[in-house]
Amino acid sequence: MPIEQAVSLTMKYYLLLFFTALVCVASEIVDNYKSYKDYKYYEVHGTQHGIKRLTEALKKNDASLVYSSSKDVAEFVIAPSLVSFFMKIVTEENLMYNILYEDISNIIQLERSILPGKGDFSWTSYYDIDDINDYLTNMSKTYPSWSELIAGGQSYQGRTILGLRINTSQRNAPKPVVFIESGIHAREWIAPATTTYFINELLTSNDSNITHIRDQFDWRIFPSCNPDGYHHSYTVDRFWRKTLSKSSNRCIGADPNRNWDYNWGQESSSDDPCDYQIYAGTKPFSEIETRSLSSYIKGIDNLLAYISLHSNAEILLVPYSDSNQHIDNYDDLVKIGNVSLDYGHEKSKQKRYRGPATAAEILYKASGGSMDWVRSVLNVPLVYTYELRGRLFYWSPEKIPEQGDEVTQMLLGLMTEACKFGYC
Ligand code: 0X9
Ligand code: ZN
């Protein structure tokens, strides 16, 4: 072969390699979403001891994702490489299990395939943080005389924790403040979605019950209190829960619901920066999100109710999350909370939420959470955490209105009953 021909063939070969590599890199950039291919999803029942052992063993492994919705049932996402290890402990501990999904990547793919493009905001899709913030901005412009954008704090990557204040002039100021903190856990997408749904109800509903509570309170509503984490969950890893701060050479983020200055680092908290779920941070309020949000909350006069929205244990929690002792108005909180759950159940006709109770009683003990800090430091009378519905932090987007209506009714029931108890 003549030398020129050989050189040109070699060049063609390298060019082909180069372009193949370029295409691969480009497709990675276009979609580097973590696939969770062949990860299985199990529900496990059995003794508390057995479940605890399984949880502890799996926690040590990066490749697993563990969470529980009560004391004797736990749910596990298991990487393919860990299935036999998981089965070994299940057998040794005589635990029972169901496979809920054989391969969770299918759900993730399906969910991704129906994410919205740019366009009108609605409640049949999940939106990224910029779209949520655009919605809040648009609403503040549409209803400028009684709503305004508020900044609750900052995120590590420089986003604003944006909220909407709804404060009509129908009653004399100062009104009692109702604060809604939503989406502090990144992957719990239904929380921001139902929160914007609720905002929309407050702004547009003609139902006299809704307009009544709209006018009665000064609402401060923050749909996404962990905006970096939410964006990360939306664009990189569906199960991301934490913030995105740089916490060590290798690992990022802390659990923003373990980072508040209330019994910090004690229950259900990890001191390992690489813990995927419950790393409590280097110290109380090490995360700018919790530090800035807490100082905003501290500055509110007349804070009557603090409501935190999570998913997906379908329960209503009252303080404190790490103790079996009851706070002084626990009985009131439970009675008011029960009415709230009745309202929700009446609307949705779905299984009633569990509770109201403390997390220590019906979920698991946890320290460093927002609601407990708000209660212990600011002594706010009405403090609740709602864990909304879903499975695997997934809730089908066309059913957002269903959950939005249920949450709207629960909040209506909560505040209406609280007033009957003399709190307003
Ligand atoms: O563990 C949590 O932070 C919450 N459950 S979740 O599955 N959404 O992560 C429960 C929160 C209980 N309340 C407090 N710790 N304040
Ligand atoms: Zn949560």
Image (cartoon, rainbow, N blue to C red):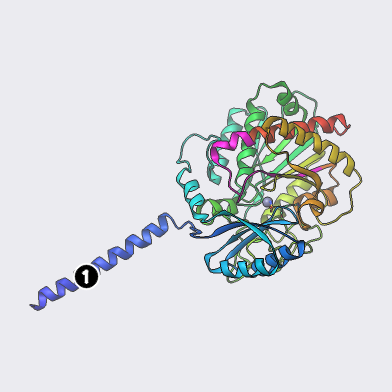
Q: Position of residue 211 (x, y in %)?
A: 71, 24
Is 71 displayed left or right of 22 in the figure? right
Residue 393 drawn in magenta: yes
Residue 389 visible to the viewer: yes
The stretch of residues the image draws in magenta is 383-403
Q: Nearer the viewer, residue 413 or 353?
A: 353
Give the quadrant of residue 303.
Answer: top right
Residue that mark 1 sits on:
13
Residue 311 drawn in magenta: no
Give the quadrant of residue 266.
Answer: bottom right
Image quarter where the C terminus lies is top right
Give the quadrant of residue 307.
Answer: top right
Q: Nearer the viewer, residue 43 or 402?
A: 43
Residue 156 visible to the viewer: no
Within 10 Å of disc 1 (Cα), the crowding (few <14, some 14-19, many 20+) is: few
Q: Position of residue 57 (x, y in %)?
A: 67, 69
Q: Position of residue 60 (x, y in %)?
A: 65, 70
Q: Amino acid at mark 1?
A: Tyr
Image quarter where the N terminus lies is bottom left
Q: Residue furthest right?
A: 328
Determine whether 305 is above or below 61 in the image.
above
